[in-house]
Image (cartoon, rainbow, N blue to C red):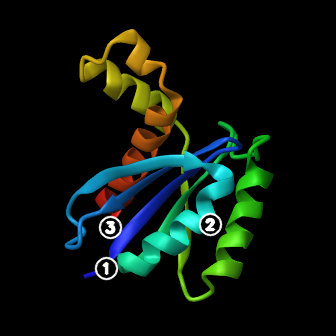
C-alpha cells in the first residue's frame, strides 16, 4: 500500500512526515530547507510509493489568510507542476506548532532541544498527518 506524505511548508524549513505502508502510523520523516523540497520529493517518490500529499494550510482564527498562505499556495502550484498525477489535499494547520512544542515538553526534551525549529516543523507535520488519519 502506498504512503501518505504530510508537508508543513515554511519560508526557510519544511517539515515532512509519512505513514507506514499500511497507513496506520504517522512518523516524522525529516526537515529540509524549503528550496530543496521539490528535489527531495522527487528522490523520495522514486524510492517510496506515495498516494497522497497533505499540506498544512495557514489560516487565522477567523479563517482569513495569513501572511504565509500565498507562500503555501505558490508551493502547491510547484507540487502540481512537478507531480501532476499526485493528489494534494490542504489541511488546517492551526495549533500544530503549539501542539508540537507541547509534545516536546511532554517528551521531556531539554530547553535547547525544544528550541530546535527543524524538529518542531517535523513534529507539526506528523501531528497534521495523525489528525488527517484520525478524520478518515
Q: Which residue is mark 3?
A: 136
Indicate which disc, 2 or 1, sits on the residue closer to the N terminus.
1
Q: Residue at 33% of width from left, 72% of height from top?
A: 3
Q: Is residue 81 left or right of residue 22?
A: right
Q: Position of residue 111 (x, y in %)?
A: 40, 10
**Number of marks in picture:** 3
Mark 2 highlights which residue?
A: 38
Residue 12, picture quadrant:
top right
Instruction: Return the mark for residue 2.
Output: 1
Image quadrant where residue 18 sits: bottom left
**Quadrant for the N terminus in the image:** bottom left
Viewer-side label of 1, 3:
1
Task: Please indicate whether residue 18 sits to the left or right of residue 42 in the image.
Answer: left
Nearest the eye: 131 or 119 = 119
- CA–CA distance between discs 1 and 3? 16 Å
Choose the circle earlier in sequence order: 2 or 3: 2
Question: Mark 2 or mark 1, which is nearer to you?
Answer: 2
Q: How crowded is the residue under tag 3: few (<14 C-alpha within 10 Å), some, or many (20+)?
A: few
CA–CA distance in space, label 2 to label 1: 19 Å
Pick the quarter of the image with the C terminus: bottom left
Horizontal side of residue 93 vs 34, given as left or right: left
- Alpha-carbon span between mark 2 and mark 3: 27 Å
Amino acid at each position: 500500500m502506498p504512503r501518505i506524505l504530510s508537508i508543513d511548508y515554511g519560508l526557510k524549513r519544511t517539515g515532512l512526515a509519512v505513514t507506514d505502508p499500511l497507513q496506520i502510523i504517522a512518523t516524522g520523516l525529516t526537515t529540509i530547507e524549503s528550496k530543496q523540497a521539490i528535489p527531495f520529493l522527487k528522490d523520495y517518490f522514486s524510492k517510496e510509493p506515495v498516494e497522497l500529499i497533505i499540506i498544512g494550510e495557514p489560516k487565522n482564527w477567523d479563517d482569513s489568510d495569513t501572511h504565509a498562505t500565498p507562500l503555501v499556495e505558490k508551493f502547491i502550484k510547484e507540487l502540481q507542476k512537478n507531480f501532476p498525477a499526485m493528489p494534494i489535499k490542504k489541511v488546517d494547520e492551526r495549533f500544530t506548532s503549539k501542539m508540537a512544542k507541547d509534545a516536546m515538553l511532554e517528551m521531556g526534551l531539554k530547553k535547547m532541544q525544544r528550541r530546535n525549529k527543524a524538529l518542531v516543523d517535523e513534529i507539526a507535520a506528523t501531528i497534521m498527518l495523525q489528525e488527517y488519519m484520525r478524520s478518515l
